[in-house]
Amino acid sequence: MQLRNSSSRYGWVSIVLHWGIALVVYGLFALGLWMVGLDYYSSWRKDAPDLHKSIGLVLLAVMLLRVVWRFVSPPPPTLPTYGRLTRVGAKLGHSALYLGLFAVMIAGYLISTADGVGIPVFGLFEVPALVSGLPDQADVAGQIHFYLAWALVIFSGLHALAALKHHFIDRDATLKRMLGRQA
């Protein structure tokens, strides 16, 4: 399989980024649900949020890389069998997923830096608190982070259902292209 995207399918860099980011997002969502239920005496009460933040910041860096990669190696064009509505829907859906991913990570950053303290990343380095002290910053960002995380998981589930619809009902190559198979 080729490194870069071609006119008929995605290259392995795009495929690894796509599926890797999907796994990390669902993993972070599960970790987030689990950690908010931890009681005060749990040994994970501090470690789980630190892990969540570290993985989230690495994901932010990977997402920035993914955006750069889209310019370096543009995705294959939509299939010619797509109608206008499907093409527009795909463009809007992908844009919403990207915006949602960045927004949920920015909200998480704003929660974590509301007190003016940077975020340690796996104990290796610290991301500084560039924005802090906004009125109710942690609470407002927390609400945004919570609802966007749910919206992102639901919307990515719809994205997966759309790919399955293309594969099993329309019998087109949409899913095959993201699996690295020839259309």
Image (cartoon, rainbow, N blue to C red):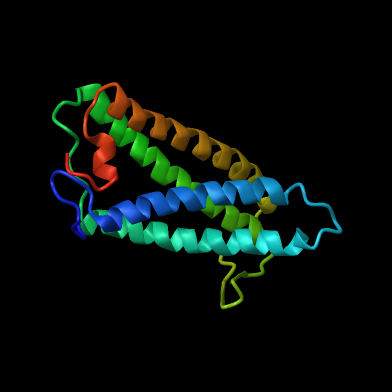
Furthest residue toward bottom: 124
Furthest residue toward right: 41
Indicate the position of residue 120 as horizontal and vertical percent values.
61, 71
| Left or right: residue 165 compared with residue 78 | right
| Left or right: residue 150 compared with residue 46 | left
The residue that appears at 36% across and 55% down in the rendered structure is 17
**Residue situated in front as seen by the camera: 129 or 5:** 5
Picture layout, residue 181 above or below residue 114: above
Picture layout, residue 77 above or below residue 3: above
Picture layout, residue 13 above or below residue 96: below
Residue 87 visible within the image: yes
| Left or right: residue 142 compared with residue 17 | right
Q: Quadrant of residue 162?
A: top left
The residue that appears at 35% across and 40% down in the rendered structure is 95
Where is the N terminus found, in terms of image quarters?
bottom left
Indicate the position of residue 91 as horizontal and vertical percent values.
29, 35
The residue that appears at 64% across and 55% down in the rendered structure is 111
| Left or right: residue 138 compared with residue 20 | right
Indicate the position of residue 59 as horizontal and vertical percent values.
47, 59
Residue 135 visible within the image: no
**Residue situated in front as seen by the camera: 92 or 166:** 166
The residue that appears at 17% across and 43% down in the rendered structure is 182
Where is the C terminus found, in terms of image quarters?
top left
